[in-house]
Amino acid sequence: MNRSSYARVIYTLTLDPLNITQKLKVIEHHFERAIPSIAPKELMKANPKHRNKILLLHYSEHQALLKALKQLPLAWKKFETVLIGVPQRLSTEALLSFGDLKAIFYHDQSPQEIAHGLNQVVNGVNWLPRNVTSQLLHYYRNVVDTHTSPVTVDLTIREIQVLRYLQNGSSNHQIAEDMFISEYTVKSHLYQIYKKLAVKNRLQATAWADLHLNE
């Protein structure tokens, strides 16, 4: 089976590379790969090489990043994001402001835990704490229940199968393996699903499936 050959790479989005690099050294040791830094202004450029980047932000710096570049939230929505150094549970509004949030790590988590989670994110797996996942699912359930109706949605058998896998938390790679299709085909199914359900991401689609797909 053909597999997409692009590499998913984690980059630190920062205004102070030297300071952040010091904080990341121990994490990089356990992660067993470098986490290079990228400046906000560089990220805002329409550069195809940025396409597969996963953005890592230290929570203590996010306000300074926003102050430095007002348009930055628009860029965040185009990338998968990871937050580290989070001091406490965030509001739903705050969680949604970070775009396609893939992982959250609190300030008291060990470098080993963070490195393990980062490896999962690189492999296409969400690494959000259970309470955060429940928080977002509750929000998206309300959104999709308000804007969609099962009567008006015409899903194919394949699309329903993909939704079932989303409910189980499967990554695109895992779905492709189990369904004997390419990851490109999985992405095509997801595009059609999002369009039909009028949702924007996996969590919203999962919330719809939890509400409307019978066991």
Image (spheres, helix red, strand yellow):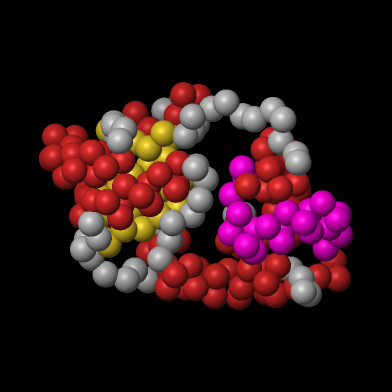
Residue interval drawn in magenta: 153-173
Image vertical order of residue 119 relative to residue 94, above or below: above
Q: Residue at x 45, y 29 (%)?
A: 50
Q: Can residue 159 be seen by looking at this rendering?
A: yes
Q: Quadrant of the C terminus?
A: bottom right
Image vertical order of residue 4 relative to residue 176, above or below: above
Magenta-highlighted stretch: main secondary structure? helix
Q: Quadrant of the N terminus?
A: top right
46 on left or right of 174: left
Q: Residue at x 76, y 41 (%)?
A: 180
Q: Can residue 196 be seen by looking at this rendering?
A: no
Give yes or no for residue 123 being in the magenta stretch.
Answer: no
Horizontal and vertical percent for residue 14?
A: 25, 40
Q: Which residue is nearer to you in this view: 46 or 49?
A: 49
The number of numbered badges drawn on the structure is 0
Q: Quadrant of residue 94?
A: bottom left
79 on left or right of 181: left
Horizontal and vertical percent for residue 44?
A: 40, 33
Q: Residue at x 70, y 53 (%)?
A: 194
Q: Residue at x 36, y 49 (%)?
A: 116
Q: Which residue is nearer to you in this view: 15 or 36?
A: 36
2 on left or right of 158: left
Horizontal and vertical percent for residue 22?
A: 13, 40
Give yes or no for residue 170 being in the magenta stretch.
Answer: yes
Horizontal and vertical percent for residue 147?
A: 70, 69
Q: Quadrant of residue 96?
A: bottom left
Q: Quadrant of residue 53?
A: top left
73 on left or right of 114: right
